[in-house]
Amino acid sequence: MTDVIDSDPAANPAAEPAPSAARPPKKRAQPKSARRRSREIALQGIYEWLVSGADASLVDAHVREQNDFDKCDTAHFDALLHGCIREAAAIDSVLARHVDRKTTQLSPVEHAVLMIGVYELQHCVEIPYKVAINEAVELAKSFGGTDGHKYVNGVLDKAAADLRTVEVEAMRAARR
């Protein structure tokens, strides 16, 4: 007795699937915006400053040597790096009301991310508060510990309620 092999793939379900059905199409990563790059590079600079205590001008010079620096929003980078360092005590005072430990006991990455988030909430009113929080959460996901982004989200959500009361209340009222 001879086995008959059908060459029609529809008739033979064990046959290999068509290439397009084999795997889902790959999603292309969105290119990073100049603002996002400025936040990432500022984060690295603030981290360096927190860990080493180096002078802001030395930190600035060091991070400007990075390969992707030319692709960042330099004005936003300057505002974040120098603003966070200059206003570190005031930013830590805001954070102290919303964190569960001293800011000196926070991971330097989460501390730097939170500093950027608070700075943007205080000084970058053209950036909606939800965007400022989301950008900080994305930084924490990329650079922080496993669940650091959850902590950052919770702290900045509370800080936003203090720093951008009208905007937060309007958003909450719109959801009702």
Image: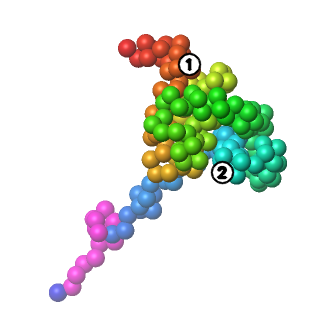
Q: Position of residue 77 (x, y in %)?
A: 74, 38
Q: In front: 59, or 129?
A: 59
Task: Point out the frontmost of discs 2 and 1.
Answer: 2
Q: Nearer the viewer, residue 22 or 5?
A: 22
Res 156 visible: no
Residue labelled with disc 1: 164
Amino acid at circle 2: Val
Q: CA distance from mark 2 to mark 1?
A: 30 Å
What residue sits 53% from the left and 45% below the top?
105
Horizontal and vertical percent position of residue 4: 25, 78
* Residue ranking furthest to the bottom: 1
- Residue drawn at point x = 45 percent, y = 37 percent: 100
Q: Work out which quarter of the rendered image holds the C terminus and state it.
A: top left
Which stretch is magenta? 2-14
Q: Is residue 83 left or right of residue 129?
A: right
Query: Which residue, given by chain and number where applicable, does mark 2 sit on?
Result: 51
**Majority secondary structure of magenta residues:** loop
**Direction left: furthest residue:** 1
Which is more toward the observer, 15 or 105? 105
Sooner in the amino-acid sequence: mark 2 or mark 1: 2
Q: Is residue 128 above or below residue 23?
A: above
User: Residue 149's mark?
Assistant: none
Left or right of residue 150, residue 34 in this image: right
User: As displayed, is residue 136 above or below residue 18?
Assistant: above
Q: Is residue 163 magenta?
A: no
Give the quadrant of the N terminus. bottom left
Query: Measured along the vertical axis of the image, is residue 113 above or below residue 118?
Result: below
